[in-house]
Amino acid sequence: MATPTVDWFTTGPEPALVGSTCTECGTVAFPPETTFCKNPACAGEEFSATELSRRGRVWSYTDAQYQPPPPYVPRTDPYEPFALAAVELAEGLVVLGQVADGYGVADLKVGAEVELVVEPLYVDEDGEERTVWRWKPVEPHSSVEPVETKESK
Amino acid sequence: MNNEVAVLGVGMHPWGKWGHSFVKYGVAAARAALDDAGVPWSDVDLIVGGETVRNGYAGYVAGSTFAQALGWNGASVATSYAACATGAQAIDTARARILAGMCEVALVVGADTTPKGFLAPNAGERWDDPDWLRFRLMGMTNPAYFALYARRRIDLYGATPEDFARVKVKNAKHGLNNPYARYRKEVGVDDVLNSAVVSDPLHLLDICATSDGGAAVLLTSMEYAKKHGIADPVRVAAVSTVTPTFPQTVIDMPLFSTESSATVPAPERTFKESIGHAAYEEAGIGPADVDVAEVYDLSTALELDWIEDLGLCARGEAESLLRVGDTTIGGRIPVNPSGGLACFGEAVPAQALAQVCELTWQLRGQAEGRQVEGARVGITANQGLFGHGSSVIVRR
């Protein structure tokens, strides 16, 4: 049984990021705000949970060809590089995340559409699989067939 | 102008991986700045230290650490921390007290001893710390953020990895004769392109290293400078330490997201644009008045971003400037004549001070082997983690 690393996303067949909406001014934030609204004209301290758009457009992208230092937990030995994307959502914000397994920078372009998926990130010290949100290209640019993703098993 | 202070002395300890205590570099730089000004330590009535977070308690109280190492002289003390912008904030503190008439002679010192490799968060589990979480949840290193900005230049403005490499080639050439630079070796475009890719599209040689180093600036009131026999010192004309304006719509280290522009529209200027803008406003000048710039080239591509953020050319045109040699010494607007971070590597609390040291030498005509002829106005630009703007304008 896989457990999300943080409660910032839903699992299930159509997972979504869970942001917050300020009950005073309506400002949406991700990760979900728990203390103070970021809007300087608002003193709001109460927030409702808001699911963000599952699809967005790539603002930019890169990859990690060297193993990041701790607290990053490598999944494989030897290390396998992964891609990262910053994605613009309809809610007016850009959210970072890793790119889905099986995809690299060659599959991405600024402005391309991507979709949110939930995939395994690492196995924790109790042997439990921990999951995270990732961005998956909707129309891959490479000729490689998209890899089937395991959505919150 | 009545809001100017004099830069009477500057000094640096060479950058490198020396393996000594940061105190040694700071004291060497401080003594060099005092010697440069011909001012005795006993005349200093304020010392401001740039805090270093990787060197234990002595680093947290850097101001008093340096004061004690120089020998207690009773001066007032302050310590500043603003990540990469630490030096500018320390200068701002010193300048404000001088302008308020609360002190006359202020010594600003920053020094660091850095570990090898990626800068990583301190040990321990901190699920509420975005700087810790970005590594745990995404493996998002500092170079990965630099790479996002670099990629946008490629996809939006037609930049190429060769352009980025040319920034390194230029800065390596600039730094060849700088005695304080850590790397003093010519680099070719192919050297950069053949170095390993760290985060696509950035290669190892596109990304700055971390270094040991120390820098110091001696600031005084204009009256003190005059009494001291210096009628026409290099002057600090502006210090910008602005924070962002909500909503911040450009993804910024170490965050997971930008702020939403749905309820409040994006401000007129991005955060980085606002840093230089505030400095220009205070100095009462514009980008066209600038003769030389020292900008924070954490990556080669980031130098191109800064050139545009400072208004030295229009958005998307920095590659054109670079290609025709405008940003090389001898060109229209030389950028990073010191060699920049490409030749230094980053020594966080010293770096913004090192930028001011270089511009001071440039404006005095003392930058031997890398002089920008006739430079009278210089600007620095830099940004510290968690919303710390940093820009200093000096002029003659």
Image (cartoon, rainbow, N blue to C red):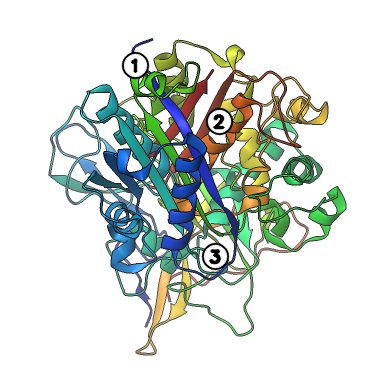
Give the mark nearest the N terminus, 3 or 2: 3
Horizontally, residue B105 falls left or right of residue B185, namely: left
Q: Residue B174: which quarter of the image?
A: top right
Q: Which residue is drawn at 26% across and 54% down?
A: B72
Identify the residue under disc 3.
B118
Q: Which residue is drawn at 51% across and 35% down?
A: B356
Q: Distance between the residues labelled 3 and 2?
A: 31 Å
Q: In the displayed structure, would residue B366 be above or below residue A115?
A: above
Residue B249, compared with residue B394, is above or below; it is below
> At numbered mark 1, what does the secondary structure look like: helix, strand or loop?
loop
Marks 1 & 3 on one chain = yes
Residue B136 image offset from top left, x and y in percent: 42, 69
| Disc 2 packing (10 Å; few <14; some 14–19; many ≥20) | many
Kindly state the secondary structure of the residue where label 2 is placed. Answer: helix
Q: Can residue A139 be seen in this view?
A: no
Query: Label 1 amino acid?
Result: Asn
Among numbered discs 1 and 2, the one appearing first in the sequence: 1
Between marks 1 and 3 in the image, the one whose residue lies nearer the viewer: 1
Q: Where is residue B178 in the image (x, y as percent from the top left)?
A: 69, 45
Question: Of B394 and B319, which appears nearest the observer?
Answer: B394
Q: Mark 3: which secondary structure?
A: loop
